[in-house]
Each structure stands twice: as C-alpha cells, then as structure tokens.
Amino acid sequence: MFMNNTLRLTAVALAFAGVAEAQTVSIGTNPQGSVAYATGSALAKVAIEQADIRMRVVPQGGPNVVVPIVNAGEMEFSIANGVVAANAYGGVGEFSRPNENIRVAAVLFPLYSGFMVRADSDINTLSDLAGRRLASDFLQQKGAQLNSESVLRTVGLTYDDVQRVPVPSGVRGVEDFEAGNVDATFFSLSSGRTLQADATIGGIRILAVENSDEALANLTEVYKGAWIETVEPGPNFPGIHEPTGAFTTPFVVLANANVSDDLVYDFIKALHDNKPALVAAAGAFEGFDPARMNADIGVPFHPGAERFFAEMGM
C-alpha cells in the first residue's frame, strides 16, 4: 500500500511539473477596449479550450509596436490588419525596415472602412471630395492615413487636392466631422463610433469605392493587403443605403517564422473548427469564414498553416 501511494504521489507530482513547464505563448494586440484586443482574447480562449495551447494576450501600443516584437522572436503571435502586415513585411509605410520573419498564420474576418459625409451633403462621390475639408494626417494612426490615401487614389486624388485638417486619430476625425469642422472623414464602417455619429448628426452617407479592376490596381499600387468589397445595407452599417464598394482589409494572425509548425497547425485547426466558440467570445467573428483563412495578402504563410490548408484542400 505504501509503495502504491508513493507511486501515485510521484505520478501526480510529475503531472503538475509537466503543466508548470508547458510552454506559454503570447499573442500581442492593441490596448484593452480595442477590437484587436477582443479578437486576441477570443483566439486565446479557443486555443486554450480547444487545442490545449497555453496562450496569453499581451496588449501593446499598436501593430507598429507589436509586429516588430514578433519579427524579433520575442513574442509568438500578434493581431494586425492586412495592410499593416504587408507594410511590415515589406518595410514600407509606418515601418522603416522589412520585418522578414513574420508569417501569416490565418486570415480572420474583413474590416470595412470608408469616407463618411452628412446624409444631406452635396458630396455624392469620391471625386466630389476635391477642394473639400477632410480630416487628415491621423498623426497617431498612420495606417488610417495610408488607407484613406489609397481610397482617394482610386479616383486620381491625393490629400494635395483637398483642404487638409490634421487630426491625431480616426476618432478625433469623427468628432471634428460631427462638429462641422470637416466635410468628410475616413473611419471604420461598423464601429460603434460610426453608429454614434449617424445618430448625432441625423444621418450619414458612405461614399462608394468603385469595385473595378482599375480601382483595385490604384488602391494597391503602393500599399498591399487590401481589396474592394461590396457591403450590403444592414443595421451594423450606418450610411450604407444600397450595395456599396468599400475599402476592405482583413484582421490576420501573424506568427514568427520560427514558431513550431505543429503549434501553428494545432492553433489554426482549432480556429477553423470552432467558429461558434469564436463568435461567442467576440461578435466580430460573425464575419469569419474558415474557407477564406488562406486569402493572399502578400505575406508568406507559416509552414504549419500551409500544411493545414493543404490537408483541407484549401
């Protein structure tokens, strides 16, 4: 009996030691309260519960901070949008040097953005923005500036063709729009802040981006990782009154190139197989399509993800 108890206690101790020594991996996100943080938290929850991966969420200042950390191998994963990921890999835009050690683990769900004007505005097309007052620069969110420049480029405009009103962030641009300080501003189409603006000023309208090959070529001429997608009217899209082309870039999971192939494979499989759990953890995953997890944004996929996609025939 004594020997059996000893063996039993030894087995329990070894089991706890194995748990203590199991690798904990990190996923970097934007600060708490952001969509990126909620997304990372949902991913970590599914990784823990469905793949037995010990994952913690590490909020940072933004993708321009966290992506280089992943590139350096100091963190395993991060959340970013497609344009940021492509810019980071190529060392353009907000990134001064290439981040060649990042890989895409999975494409998650689309993010839609566009220029909003007042519902009764005489600005009816993107071309009508010429000479008008636009929120610009987005000093604390350079990605928003790059994305909005890409949309203007679809109709041959730049910020040199408008009256620039510098703002620190997209939210401040919306505030200036509500106050009447600008005629249009660029922001997320489904954000709660956009819904608030729609209610505050009695209605907004989103300017359509032409969904054509020529417009797409202009959109991605400088910055990759985005496309034009038609958004249908719905309660989550104020200012969309008919099918409307919109700037679209997906949220993606990035991984360091040296993260274990098996770890990435198990992680991606858990995401692919458990959309209901992801939606329960973060409503934004309603737009997650497992069949599009391997959409090309111009950044190489991690080998572990490639193996899973190949097995699924994707």
Image (cartoon, helix red, strand yellow):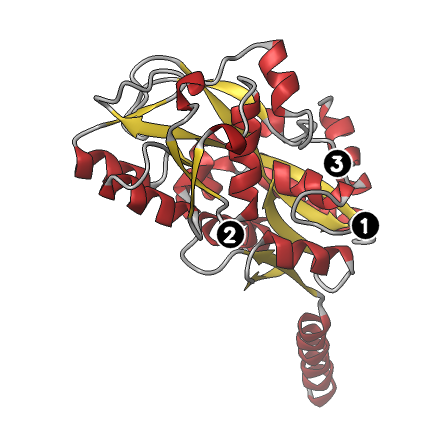
The quarter of the displayed image where residue 5 is located = bottom right
Precedes in sequence: disc 1 or disc 3: 1
Question: Which label is found at residue 139?
Answer: 2
The residue sitting at 60% across, 58% down in the picture is 28
Give the percent coordinates (x, y) of residue 22. Answer: 71, 68
Which of the two marks, 2 or 1, is nearer to us in this view?
2
- SS for dot 1: loop
Q: Which three-letter amino acid code belongs to the residue tagged 1?
A: Asn
Give the percent coordinates (x, y) of residue 40. Answer: 53, 52
- Say if residue 192 shows up in the picture: no
**Left or right of 231 on screen, residue 54:** right
Q: Are marks 3 and 2 in contact (CB under 8 Å)?
A: no
The residue singled out by tag 3 in the image is 299
Give the percent coordinates (x, y) of residue 16. Answer: 66, 76
Q: Find the distance from the CA under tag 3 to the CA under tag 2.
A: 26 Å
Q: Find the distance from the CA under tag 1 to the CA under tag 3.
A: 10 Å
Bin the neighbour count of mark 2 within 10 Å (Cα to Cα): few under 14, some 14-19, many 20 and up: some
Which of the two marks, 3 or 2, is nearer to us in this view?
2
The residue sitting at 52% across, 49% down in the picture is 141
